Image (spheres, grey):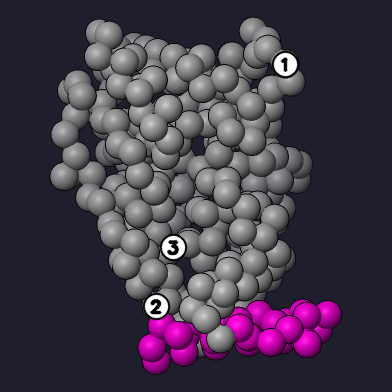
């Protein structure tokens, strides 16, 4: 099957699952099809699917990621020993683990084609990720607490694992509790990564964007928490600070060059 044929198969299968959308016609253009497919992935509840669906989905997503361009962590140059800064799409980074800025339900973003990292991670990992997260939440019996972390496989992403953490949501200026919770996100992910023998971890800019933590203060907390953790535990885990915006790249660059 070509990418177009796979995409049409996936759209048809997802539309069939939801009778209320049965009258939607598959668009002609590739871009409109991609938008529709991502929307259907985003709104789909965590339910099992057939082996055939998974095989076609997996082949499709892995090819889409390949076309976006995969960056291997080994091709990056460290700013300091064990600390990296990389500007790019975290869903294309080949490394041991990436961090997803999740919400308290831990099920991903249900808003069709939303621009948050949670949406991108769940879209390109595939439907297996939402199902795995739902199982974790079912076992836990309550929503994820701010500052904690969970780990899942990464499925179709080029990394091995995804660590999901819930950062604080900011209203006005960050409080001391907000700052402590954000630092806890980084520590929890580092601890969980090492418990799973993970050698490197890529952090997104947790709680910035939709959660409104000021970018500069969030970056300061991120860098300081990672440095403190590595110093206190003598950890050799490699940390990649992943940014998507030039603003954040400049902030992290300045912080990492400061010491």
Q: Residue at x 50, y 53 (%)?
A: 121
Q: Residue at x 41, y 83 (%)?
A: 3
Kindly state the secondary structure of the residue where label 2 is placed.
helix
Q: Estimate how packed mark 3 is, as few (under 14), some (14 to 19) or many (20 or more) residues with alpha carbons within 10 Å.
A: some
Q: Position of residue 2 (x, y in %)?
A: 38, 88
Q: Is residue 88 above or below residue 179?
A: below
Q: Is residue 209 above or below residue 258?
A: below
The answer to whether residue 182 is left or right of residue 63 is right
Closer-to-camera residue (114/77): 114
> How far apart are labels 2 and 1 at the CA level?
44 Å
> How far apart are labels 2 and 3 at the CA level?
11 Å
- Can you identify the residue that label 2 sits on? 59
Which of marks 3 and 1 precedes in the sequence? 3
Range drawn in magenta: 1-27
Nearer the viewer's eye, disc 2 or disc 1? Answer: 1
Q: Residue at x 65, y 31 (%)?
A: 211
The answer to whether residue 123 is left or right of residue 90 is right
Visible in this render: residue 53?
no
- Can you identify the residue that label 1 sits on? 172
Quadrant housing residue 225: top left
Kindly state the secondary structure of the residue where label 3 is placed.
loop
> How far apart are labels 1 and 3 at the CA level?
37 Å
The answer to whether residue 52 is left or right of residue 21 is left
Kindly state the secondary structure of the residue where label 1 is placed.
loop
**The C terminus, quarter of image:** top left
Quadrant housing residue 148: top right
Q: Estimate how packed mark 1 is, as few (under 14), some (14 to 19) or many (20 or more) residues with alpha carbons within 10 Å.
A: few
Cβ–Cβ under 8 Å for marks 2 and 1? no
- Can you identify the residue that label 3 sits on? 155
Q: Main secondary structure of the magenta part?
A: helix
Closer-to-camera residue (19/230): 19
């Amino acid at each position: 099957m070509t990418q177009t044929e796979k995409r049409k198969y996936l759209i048809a299968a997802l539309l069939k699952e939801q009778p209320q959308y049965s009258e939607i016609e598959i668009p002609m253009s590739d871009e409109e099809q991609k938008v529709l497919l991502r929307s259907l992935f985003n709104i789909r509840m965590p339910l099992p699917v057939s082996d055939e669906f998974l095989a076609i989905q997996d082949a499709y997503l892995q090819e889409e990621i390949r076309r976006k361009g995969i960056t291997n962590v080994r091709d990056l140059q460290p700013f300091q020993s064990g600390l990296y800064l990389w500007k790019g799409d975290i869903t294309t980074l080949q490394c041991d683990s990436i961090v997803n800025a999740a919400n308290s339900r831990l099920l991903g973003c249900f808003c069709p084609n939303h621009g948050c990292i949670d949406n991108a991670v769940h879209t390109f990992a595939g439907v297996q990720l939402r199902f795995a997260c739902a199982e974790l939440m079912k076992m836990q019996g309550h929503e994820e607490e701010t500052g904690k972390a969970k780990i899942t496989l990464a499925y179709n992403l080029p990394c091995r694992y995804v660590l999901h953490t819930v950062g604080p949501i900011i209203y006005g200026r960050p409080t001391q509790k907000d700052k402590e919770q954000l630092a806890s996100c980084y520590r929890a992910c580092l601890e969980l990564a090492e418990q799973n023998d993970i050698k490197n971890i890529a952090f997104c800019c947790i709680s910035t964007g939709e959660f409104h933590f000021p970018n500069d203060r969030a970056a300061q907390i991120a860098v300081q928490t990672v440095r403190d953790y590595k110093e206190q535990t003598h950890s050799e885990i490699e940390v990649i600070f992943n940014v998507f915006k030039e603003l954040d790249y400049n902030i992290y660059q300045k912080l990492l060059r400061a010491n």
